[in-house]
Amino acid sequence: LTPGFSVGYLAQEPQLDPALTVRENVIVSHHLRSKASLLGFFFGSSQAKADEAEFGKSADDIIDFLGLQAIRGEMASNLPQGHLRALGMAIGLATQPEIILLDEPFAGMNHDETMRMVALVRRLRDERGLTVLLVEHDMPAVMKISDRIVCINFGEKIAEGTPAEIQANPRVIEAY
């Protein structure tokens, strides 16, 4: 990690604007990185126009990477749970993080949605080089994603290790 590294966060309930499309939500998320001032955006300065063009291209790249092309123009309010989580991931990626924190990314998903999201998280790690920290209770999903796992039971760390070590740990077996 570099000094001043950035951290992205995907809350259990993604923070998005249901009145915007998928693409618009991702574009808005880029504004944390804008070079233009608020007045520049208001008056349409050349820097604001350059920022908007860059944010649109970046949003399209993120949407394509996440496989959301088919819903790019959908209103966020119309999306099922799995797509909402993927949109939340897109919003988090708009900040260009080096680490992404995922808070129960599979909660409320059916098996197929969970497996799609597991594949997505693995791609973020493997293809984008992101460090992924996740809090999750779905142990099969955790085992498919993680290189290292820390298990906590009622606020106490009970185990740390590789997925194989965790699966064989008697304290973890007892707790879960």
Image: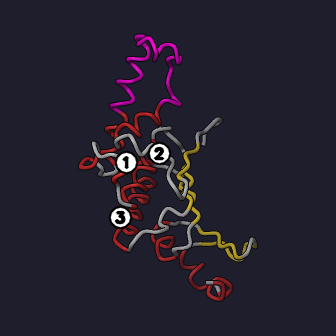
- Which residue is rendered at x = 41% and y = 13% of the image? 44
Q: Nearer the viewer, residue 48 or 171?
A: 48
Chief secondary structure of the magenta portion: helix
Residue type at mark 1 is Ala
Residue 162 on image: x %, y % = 57, 72
- Which residue is rendered at x = 40% and y = 55% of the image? 84
Query: What is the secondary structure assignment of the residue under circle 2?
Result: loop
Q: Which numbered circle lies on residue 25?
A: none
The residues colored magenta run 31-57
Cα–Cα span, label 1 and label 3: 19 Å
Residue 90 on image: x %, y % = 42, 46
Cα–Cα span, label 2 and label 1: 8 Å
What quarter of the picture does the C terminus occupy?
bottom right
Question: Can you say whether 165 is above or below 28 in the image?
Answer: below
Q: Which of marks 2 and 1 is nearer the N terminus?
A: 2
Provide the residue designation for mark 2. Answer: 16
- Which residue is rendered at x = 52% and y = 66% of the image? 146
Q: Could you say which quadrant of the image residue 80 lies in?
A: bottom left
Say which of marks 3 and 2 sits in front. 2
Provide the residue designation for mark 3. Answer: 116
Cα–Cα span, label 3 and label 2: 21 Å
The local crowd at label 3, few if under 14, some if 14 to 19, many if 20 or more residues have their Cα within 10 Å, is some
Q: Which of marks 3 and 2 is nearer the N terminus?
A: 2
Q: Are marks 2 and 1 in contact (CB under 8 Å)?
A: yes
Residue 173 on image: x %, y % = 61, 87
Residue type at mark 3 is Arg
